[in-house]
Amino acid sequence: MTTKLSCRDIERLVIEGEDRELAAETRRLVDDHLRGCGRCRGFAADRSAIRETFADARWPAPPEQLVRATRRRLHEESAGERVATVPAWILVVLAVTTVVTGLWLAIALADVGPETALADMPVAGLAAVIVIIQNALMLFLAPVVLRTVRSRRRAGSA
């Protein structure tokens, strides 16, 4: 089965072939297309000429003041990005879930004795579900909170 590539595909592959070795089958498809398509052959020749022209070019070093200013600006921008905030709704959900869990557990544990079974405590079953939900929320949201605290500490010390 012969794969027919468009000129756009060939241009992309010519550019890719400048940076890495193409697979043998792909290289064959490109070469076949270039033999039959003057437009793509011209594109490949132009790319090759440009690369040869600039291969020996000596690029001037930027002024040291520009390098320092650019590094300082990049550092300022990256420091600003590191400061994350915990959305207020996450804090509210954590607080409400913690309060509700505490109340349910207090109610459930008030009637617990050594002879009490879980089936005798419908409130305790609900409290256990709420504890599980709270733990799941903490597992998913704790990294966000920790990342925020750490980024604020880093921003404060910088």
Image (spheres, grey):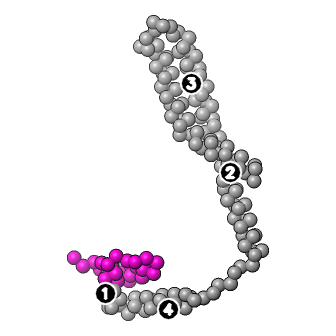
User: How far apart are the two marked residues, 2 and 1, measured between alpha carbons?
Assistant: 54 Å
Residue position for label 2 = 83
Number of the front mark, 2 or 3: 2
- Which numbered disc, 3 or 4, marks the residue that appears first in the sequence? 4
Range shown magenta:
1-30
Judged from the image, the secondary structure of the residue bearing numbered disc 1 is helix
Whether residue 93 is situated above or below residue 79 in the rendered picture: above
- The percent coordinates of residue 137 (x first, y second) are 54, 35
User: How far apart are the two marked residues, 3 and 4, measured between alpha carbons?
Assistant: 72 Å
Prevailing SS of the magenta stretch: helix
Q: Is residue 8 left or right of residue 103?
A: left
Residue position for label 4 = 49
- Which numbered disc, 4 or 1, marks the residue that appears first in the sequence? 1
Residue 61 shown in magenta: no
Residue position for label 1 = 32
Which image quadrant is residue 101 in?
top right
Quarter of the rendering occupied by the N terminus: bottom left
Which amino acid, by three-letter code, is at mark 2? Val
User: How far apart are the two marked residues, 4 and 1, measured between alpha carbons?
Assistant: 21 Å
Q: Is residue 67 left or right of residue 53?
A: right
- The percent coordinates of residue 10 (x first, y second) are 38, 81
